[in-house]
Amino acid sequence: MSNSKPRVKLTGIGILSRLAVMHYYTDQAGIDVRAVKEEDRIVDVSAGIEIAHNLKLRLASKEDAEFLAVFPTSIESIIQYSLNDYVLEYSLDANDDSKSVAEASDRIRRMINSTVLAFRMLKPGYVDSNVILWITQRGKDKHPSLMAEKTIRAHPLDHYRLRIDELSKLTDLVQKVFNADSARRRSVHIALDRFNRSYYEIEDEDKLIDFMIAFEALYLEGEGRFQHAIVPVACAMLLGQTPEERYEIRNLLNLAYEVRNSIVHGSDYRKKLRKKELELEDLINDVEEILRGSLKKLI
């Protein structure tokens, strides 16, 4: 008589919004992988690209659409798009008991969320997976369910275009982000959370505040004194390759601190920006890129 416990296979399918995968012939010219001739293909996106162990980036399938069709009302009320071209698929086997299933489900959810965050850390652009289709399989029987989170997009941004030659960097980032989340290092967790939260802010001012909190979590780790002096210098030393680059990073973050302080204290920050001949959006984009570089180095 076998003493083995019954097993269940859990699969989370994260429905990706606004993602395009690009096949590059040169650094300048690229084409969507779906339009590449079969003999020229580097990857098979129908079968799936392995991003991490048990994690695939693949084209959405007919079966995905059939499962999602069970939840038409929920889908329409939560997301602004129908089934998109690409999904993240992550599968785990677990003992068929409530604790094991809950632990596996949590790991799947965190892996999908970590991958979306890794996309965002890799480069600018909007990509999201605010709907996860769950498939619980016992034997040949597959039972679908749905987890959805409402996404607020601040602006109608362009598609996120992932190049095939960026896959190795993405894979490395996915593992780093997932491990950082698992380790629960408070300072890193705060920095990642604030960077991620910035994608859902409606106001540009709130986005800048998120960025500056993330910098302080990364560089100060709980020490709150003299942050306006420490963060620009520390960041410039970490990321600047030349004296000119370090000077530019330090000055930009000093300005960001001045603008952030004006925002939180209710004073007019626009005069400071006009002196530098900058718009708030330009400052935010520059600061975001510096934060992205910091996160890649320090997580």
Image: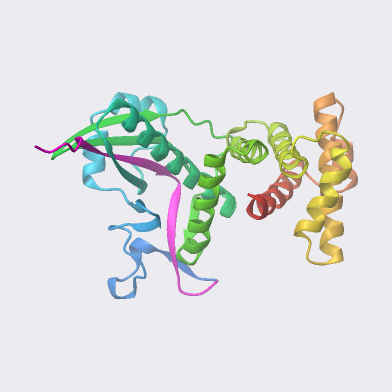
Q: How many marks?
A: 0
Quick check: 158 left or right of 8? Answer: right
| Residue at x-position 85% and y-position 42% | 273
* Residue furthest left as drawn: 1
Residue 226: name its quadrant: top right
Quick check: 55 left or right of 141? Answer: right
197 or 179, nearer to the observer = 179
| Residue at x-position 49% and y-position 31% | 151
77 or 233, nearer to the observer = 233
Q: Quadrant of the N terminus?
A: top left
x and y percentages locating residue 205 in the rendered image: 73, 33
Q: Is residue 126 visible?
A: no
138 or 157, nearer to the observer = 138
Identify the main secondary structure in magenta. Answer: strand
x and y percentages locating residue 100 in the rendered image: 33, 32
Q: What segment carries the magenta color?
A: 1-27
x and y percentages locating residue 121 in the rendered image: 58, 50
User: Does residue 46 show up magenta in the picture?
Assistant: no
x and y percentages locating residue 62 in the rendered image: 22, 46
Quick check: 136 left or right of 103? Answer: left
Q: Is residue 102 above or below residue 10?
A: above
User: Does residue 19 show up magenta in the picture?
Assistant: yes
Q: Is residue 281 visible?
A: yes
| Residue at x-position 35% and y-position 66% | 43
